Amino acid sequence: MIAKHQPPLMKKHSQTDLVSRLKSRKVLGVGGEDDDGEIHRSKISQVLGNEMKFTMKEPLGLRLWQLVSAVMFSVVAMMALTFPDQLYDLVFDKGGSESKISVRLYGGALLSISLIMWNVLYTAEKMVIRWTLLCEACYFTVQFIVTSITLLEVGVLPWGASLLLFSRGLFIIISVYYYYQLGLKAKKV
C-alpha cells in the first residue's frame, strides 16, 4: 500500500493576524459592548448575565425614606378610614361632617398606595423604586396644589394646614431627590 503523505499543516498564528484576533474576540464576546454600554469579559458573562449591571448603589437614606413613606401612608390611611371627622378637623380647623365619605375614599386610596410602598421595600429593582418615588412625588404635588387652592377659597390658613403644606413641600423635594439620584449612571470603577 502506498501511504499518502498529508501536506504539512500550516499553523496559523492568530496572535500575529489582527483580523483573526478580532474575529476570535467577537465570537468569544470579549470586549464587546451591550445595549447599556457594559463591556463583557466573556461569552459566559453574557449568557449568565452581568450581575454588576443589576446591582445598584443606593443613595444614603433611601431605604429609611421608603420605610417612613410606607408608615406615613398607612397611618394617615387608617386615620382617614376610622376617624374621618377628626382628620378633617385637624387639617382645616372646622367640622367636616359633610365630607366624611370623601375623607374615607381618600383613606382607601392612601391604603392602596401604602401597600405599594410596603412592597417596594423588598425589591432591589431600580426602575420599580424609581416609579414608586415618582408616584409619591406626584401624589404630594397634587395634595399640595389641592390643599393650597382649598385654603385660598376658604381665606384662612390654619396651623394644621400650614404644617401640612410645609411637610408636603419637603416630601416633594425628598422624593424628587431620590428619584434623580437613582436615575444617575453609576461610575465604573
Image (spheres, grey):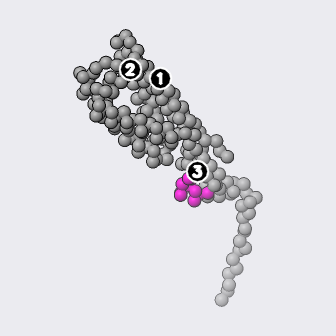
The residue beneath circle 2 is: 147
Magenta span includes 47: yes
Please state if 101 lies on the left or on the right of 120 as rendered. Answer: left
Of marks 3 and 1, which one's residue comes earlier in the chain?
3
Label 3 Cα crowd, 10 Å radius (few <14 / some 14-19 / many 20+): few
Q: Which mark is residue 166?
A: 1
Q: Image point 42% across, 33% down: which residue?
A: 135
Which amino acid, by three-letter code, is at mark 2? Thr
Quadrant (top left/top right/bottom left/bottom right) for the N terminus: bottom right
Please state if 26 lies on the left or on the right of 62 as rendered. Answer: right
Indicate the secondary structure of the residue bearing disc 1.
helix
**Foreground residue among 38 and 85:** 85
Whether residue 36 can be seen here: no
Range of the magenta residues? Answer: 42-52
The residue beneath circle 3 is: 52
Which amino acid, by three-letter code, is at mark 3? Met
Camera-side mark, 2 or 3: 2
- Answer with the quarter of the image where residue 74 lies: top left
Q: Which mark is residue 50?
A: none
> Where residue 76 sits in the image (x, y, percent)?
36, 33
Q: Image point 39% across, 24% down: which residue?
A: 143
**Foreground residue among 107 and 42:** 107
Of marks 1 and 2, which one's residue comes earlier in the chain?
2
